[in-house]
Image (cartoon, grey):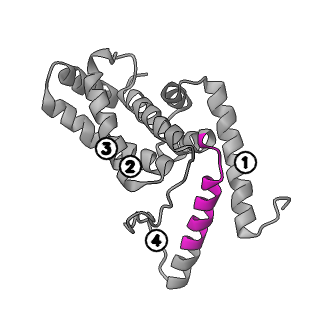
Amino acid sequence: MISRTDDAEAELVVRAQAGDHRAFALLVGRYQDPVFRFVLRMSGIRDEAMDLTQDTFLKAYRSLPAWRPEARFRTWLFQIAHNATLDVLRRRQRVEFVPFAEDAQDGAVLEAPDSAPTPEQALADRQRIGMLERALRELPAEQREVLLLREVEDMSYAEIAATLGIGEGTVKSRLARARVAALAHYRGHAGENSDE
């Protein structure tokens, strides 16, 4: 089923395809932060993520004539971001995860919501986030990206499959393995017995 949001978004893309720069700017405004978060958590380097985000939108703009209304723009855009990020990761031959709390490259803080009323609760929350970050860093890139797209970007299985160029069954199996592995790593960092 196509929603009004999808219809409005498709209309923006059609207008952008026709040369309406304002329509494309609205699309950039809508997706710049989610694309940046995804790329940052995959690449691990803030400056590189900023460049990749900009490159993603440049590639999307240049490729607008190839976009078709049957594909959701968000899925298409994340596919471009995914491919650009994988290219960089392959060149680096390593994968790192960027913590939610602090980017070690420049000290900029990416604040996690803190609803804790006491300093003790805030400390406990930061410790749990740190353990989660370590657990996510230990996942293979293919599992981490599926987990981020599903849990952080709230994409459907079909959207993730289209974004990554894999089948929905593969998405489901990678996601299941990622959740199990992330939980096991988290419990290991928390000092919990995984048999509990």
Q: Which residue is mark 1?
A: 180
Q: Which residue is mark 4?
A: 115
Residue 154 as seen in the image, left or right of residue 174? left
Q: Secondary structure at mark 4?
A: loop
Mark 2 vs 1, N-terminal side: 2
- Displayed quadrant of residue 191: bottom right
- Displayed quadrant of residue 70: top left
Question: Is 101 a magenta residue?
Answer: no
Q: Which residues are magenta?
A: 125-141
Q: Where in the figure is residue 74, as x and y percent of width and height?
A: 38, 32
CA neighbours of label 2 inside 10 A, class few (<14), some (14 to 19), many (20+): some
Q: Amino acid at mark 2?
A: Glu
Mark 3 vs 2, N-terminal side: 3
Mark 1 vs 3, N-terminal side: 3
**What residue appears at the point 82 percent right and 64 percent down from the top-left corner?**
193
Q: Which residue is mark 2?
A: 48
Measure the alpha-carbon separation of dots 1 and 4: 27 Å
Observer-side mark, 1 or 4, equals 1
Q: Amino acid at mark 1?
A: Val
Q: Amino acid at mark 4?
A: Ser
Q: Secondary structure at mark 1?
A: helix
Mark 2 vs 4, N-terminal side: 2
Measure the alpha-carbon separation of dots 3 and 2: 15 Å
Instruction: Please report contact status of discs 3 and 4: CB closer than 8 Å, yes or no.
Output: no
**What residue appears at the point 33 percent right and 45 percent down from the top-left corner?**
51
- The count of marks equals 4
CA neighbours of label 3 inside 10 A, class few (<14), some (14 to 19), many (20+): some
Measure the alpha-carbon separation of dots 1 and 3: 30 Å
Q: Quadrant of the N terminus?
A: top left
Measure the alpha-carbon separation of dots 3 and 4: 26 Å
Q: In the image, is residue 194 above or below residue 49?
A: below
Q: Which residue is mark 3?
A: 32
